[in-house]
Amino acid sequence: MHGSLSDSQSGMQAGAAPRTSRYRVSGMDCGSCAAKIETALRRVPGIHEVRVSVPAGTVAVSHEEALGADAVVRPLAALGYGAVPADPIAEGPDAACGGCCCGSETHSHFHSHSHGDADEAPWWRGPKARLTMAAGAALAAATVLGLLVPAAEPWAFPLALLVGLVPVARRALAAARAGTPFSIEMLMTVAAIGALLIGAVEEAATVLVLFLIGELLEGVAAGRARAGIRGLTALVPDTALLERDGGAPQAVPATGLAVGSVILVRPGDRVAADGIVLSGRSAVDESPVTGESVPKPKGEGDAVFAGTINADGALRVRVTAAARDNTIARIVRLVEEAQAGKAPTERLIDRFARFYTPGIVAVAALVALVPPLAFGGVWTEWIYRALAVLLIGCPCALVISTPAAIAAGLSNGARRGLLLKGGAVLEALGRITTVAFDKTGTLTEGRPRVTDLVPLRGSEAELLADAAALEAGASHPLARAILAAAADRGIAPPAADGVTALPGAGLTGRVDGRTVALLSPQAAASASALRPAQAEQAAAFAEAGKTVSVLLVDGIAAGLIAMRDEPRPDARSGIAALDRAGIRSLMVTGDNARTAGAVAGALGMTAHAELLPDDKLRIVRGLQAGGQRVAKVGDGINDAPALAAADVGIAMGGGTDVALETADAAILHGRVGDVAAMVALSRRTMANIRQNIALALGLKAVFLLTTVLGVTGLWPAILADTGATVLVTANALRLLSVRA
């Protein structure tokens, strides 16, 4: 993960190490925008590194301590962009950053060449829309005036052209001074002036209006994609009901809740902060955060997430995370950090694009000069064709083909609880051939539960009641399993007296005047309390990977209780989904071989058991040495080395901070089937990228050929540029609504 970003205020403290500041940039929607901003800011003295995130609408600069905010704002203003310091997500959706500016520095691309509108304003009220409407109105007025007063036509259309051309030319010159001479604004300016000089002024004015309309549409499409993640921050309510000094709850801003505060969540309210339920029972709809469609029952001790919806009962919740650290903030932060890293395909496209536009300019020069000089062609005809070739020279559709799809794929995954730390991870997942799963807490629920009750005297309820009576004061996992089983059956355990632990054997005490003991099978056998048939049944449970406790009442076996950490409900179907995708699954666990084999056998996979962290690492590297591309899925500290070494490390939801930090991806909801969903999302995204590249290059190639041959002119050329970008963006946006 990328290092966290500092506050973006201009008042820097002297003497500190170089720091990174973030700014929110309005009107930045494309790869061309990102390149111009990066080039301009790299020229500013004192700035060491620049990272641009178009999906987040932010730029992060690593700079010397003495650098003020104006050093960033001024160059961007000259290029036509607005910039303000970006605050962390703590302020929520109403903050200055619009809720989309949290996380680390990022770099990625969307598309629109015109700049300056505030992202919060409706698209039709921004400077981009105003310029488009002004240029369109001027063209319409010139057309009408030319029809009514033919003598006015020679000056009406040039004036109409200038309405749109002057702002575009100003930005072109600013970009050239900042180190980007081959911007789309420069190509458009040269084409318009050239058309004016050869007498094609009406067509030049019309093409400029089409150019501005195309940009406006591209900006709208980019804004829709950007809103996908920003919309998550709107899930958190503005206010919370805070309990103070035993008085009535008071409404306070949710962003100001401190860790340890106690809030009341009424039925129908959204939960205002991550926390632990102190009292109350209800069902909570977690679908906005985890994608889980079925509301989850919540009671004392259960965790709840900010932005989820309380259904039918009041809950008192103790806040466990400040606004900037809650689940939604972490999701947004992870996604924006993910957009910082370029996928291999994106890096390849960027390298190609650096040569594409200069190459097109060279082709345009040859088209303008060679036919007239070498073959006696008509100058105006070939200059016109060269100008049309220039308009095909913008690589934006190609540049955006990869990052637009990756940004949409990352946003889609985040909304379903599939968090991926970058385009490189998203790309790598589709090539995985083997998945190595941890067992406890990954394939299984991470806690034992009662699987079998075998009463030897009396009923199951009596067996469970006596066992729960002895375990009532205990907190170890097996005790919790017995107490949970009793609670699920509505059994209230009787009081037990004189409960004593028997080291290595179990518990004993008095229940309703009887001597009751809960022992291991070995301890019960040593006391000669088990008959051969009963001992065989206990051994069969143990062979199946279950832990067995024997209940004795007055020295006589009264029943067997078998417990096991059971596979997650979707574990078998999740492994089957990977198998259908051609991916092999195996288990790597530190648990004993018998338990691991039983669980793995039930799931149809191979088990490697009794492993230390170094052993898991060795297995992963061995698979990689054999040509396998390995994903490691785990949730604990002992998984961290293997997670880091795997081609893709995936942390299971609810895992330790170490696992989440080390992994490349995280499954928020903890479903085994989400591993296959991640792979499917990756493969679908890569297919979308291939479609986009073919669309971008195909349209450019077709119109380049037809323009040189004289079949198409300026209008189709500009439509080929803006049309290709709109089509590529729209195709990428399909990923936002795809469900695996």
Image (cartoon, rainbow, N blue to C red):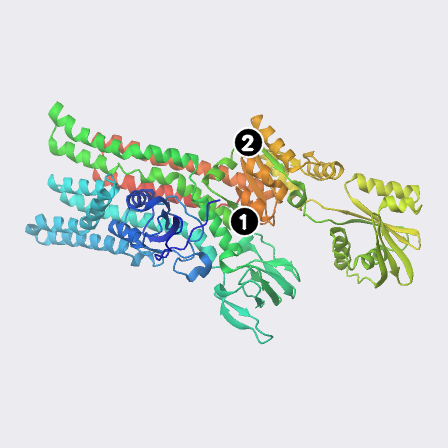
User: What is the quadrant of residue 357 in the picture?
Assistant: top left
Q: Nearer the viewer, residue 331 or 642?
A: 642
SS for callout 2:
loop
Q: Which of 255 and 673 is in front in this view?
A: 255
SS for callout 1:
loop
Q: On the image, numbered disc 1 is attached to which residue?
A: 417
Q: Farthest front residue?
A: 15
Disc 1 residue type (three-letter): Gly
In the image, residue 621 above or below residue 216? above
Residue 239 in view:
yes
Left/right of residue 707 with respect to residue 95 in the rendered view: left
Left/right of residue 447 with respect to residue 139 in the rendered view: right
Disc 2 residue type (three-letter): Arg
In the image, residue 533 above or below residue 147? above
User: What is the quadrant of residue 587 in the picture?
Assistant: top right
Q: Earlier in the sequence, mark 1 or mark 2?
A: 1
How far apart are labels 1 and 2 at the CA level?
24 Å
User: What is the quadrant of residue 310 in the picture?
Assistant: bottom right
Give the numbered dot on residue 629: 2
Are there few (<14), some (14-19), or many (20+) residues within 10 Å of tag 1? many
Which residue lies at the image location 54% right of the left edge and 70% below the top edge? Answer: 241
Q: Farthest left residue?
A: 151
The image position of residue 236, as x and y in percent, is 50, 61
Are there few (<14), some (14-19), or many (20+) residues within 10 Å of tag 2? many
The image position of residue 432, as x and y in percent, is 54, 33
The image position of residue 267, as x and y in percent, is 58, 67
